Amino acid sequence: MIGVSVKTLQRWDRKGILKAFRTPTNRRYYTHKQYVDYMNNSNPKRGKTIIYARVSSSSSKEDLINQIGFLKQYASSRGMVVDEVVEDIGSGLNYNRKNWNKLIEDCLSGVVKTILVTHKDRFVRFGFDWFEKFLKSNGVEIIAVNNEDLSPEEELINDLISIIYVFSCRICGLRKYKKQIKEDNEIAKELQKRKMKHDGAVS
């Protein structure tokens, strides 16, 4: 993981450069915290401040530009130097966003120190608090600049609206393939099976 041989680790252990823990059978082992600390101290790129901006569709590119401009002003007003801007177009419910995944990888490899986002949901729609703790355990701080204090009811309503929006988009997308779906025997059988189950349940 850190790119050195077993012999080097043994030597570092003896010299106290990177002390290993020992199992009851006297085998060396290391903790994740040691890995993070080592990467923090040894990686010259460590300490990057990243702006992360996301919109759901290409038609919202103006909002993407506004997010970046706002976060650059925020960073500048606090004397923070922005090293990189990461942009994504895709749903906050989608964890397969290419640039988002690359950002997470950079956090785990010790490259990133701070992530700036306009709102929590720009980073991820659900589980922001979990990601915040996870990244913090890897030495990364994520700052949601326009963090709104919403009641639990308001948060739930926003989440439900997001789910409805995403599934609506998917249904609209499926309409393009209506003809192909009808012609596909396997899909037709599956749809028929579900219809029969539904009709049986209703009756």
Image (cartoon, helix red, strand yellow):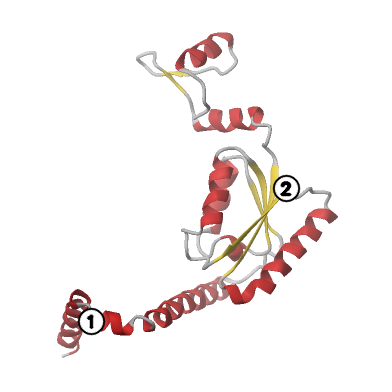
- The residue at the point 52 percent across, 52 percent down is 101
Q: Residue at x 62, y 71 (%)?
A: 150
Res 23 quadrant in image: top left
Q: Exactly how many numbered labels are in the figure?
A: 2
Q: Which residue is mark 2?
A: 83
| Quadrant of res 203 | bottom left
Image location (x, y in percent) of residue 152: 55, 70
SS class, disc 2: loop
| Location of residue 163 in the rendering, given as x and y in whole percent from the top left corner | 46, 74
Compared across the picture, whether 164 is left or right of 108 comes to: left
Based on the displayed image, in which of its 4 quarters is residue 175 positioned? bottom left
- Where is 140 relative to 172, above or below? above
Pick whichever of labels 1 and 2 is earlier in the sequence: 2
Mark 1 to mark 2 CA distance (whole Å): 51 Å
Under mark 2, the amino acid is: Asp
Q: Is residue 123 above or below residue 58?
A: above
Label 1 SS: helix
Q: Amino acid at mark 1?
A: Glu
Residue 113: give its label.
none
Of residues 162 and 112, which is closer to you in this image? Answer: 112
Dot 1 surroundings within 10 Å: few (below 14), some, or many (20 or more)?
few
Q: Is residue 163 left or right of residue 99?
A: left
| Front residue of 89 and 182 | 182
Residue at 19 percent across and 88 percent down: it is: 202
In the picture, the disc for residue 183 is 1
Relative to 193, is 90 on the left or the right? Answer: right
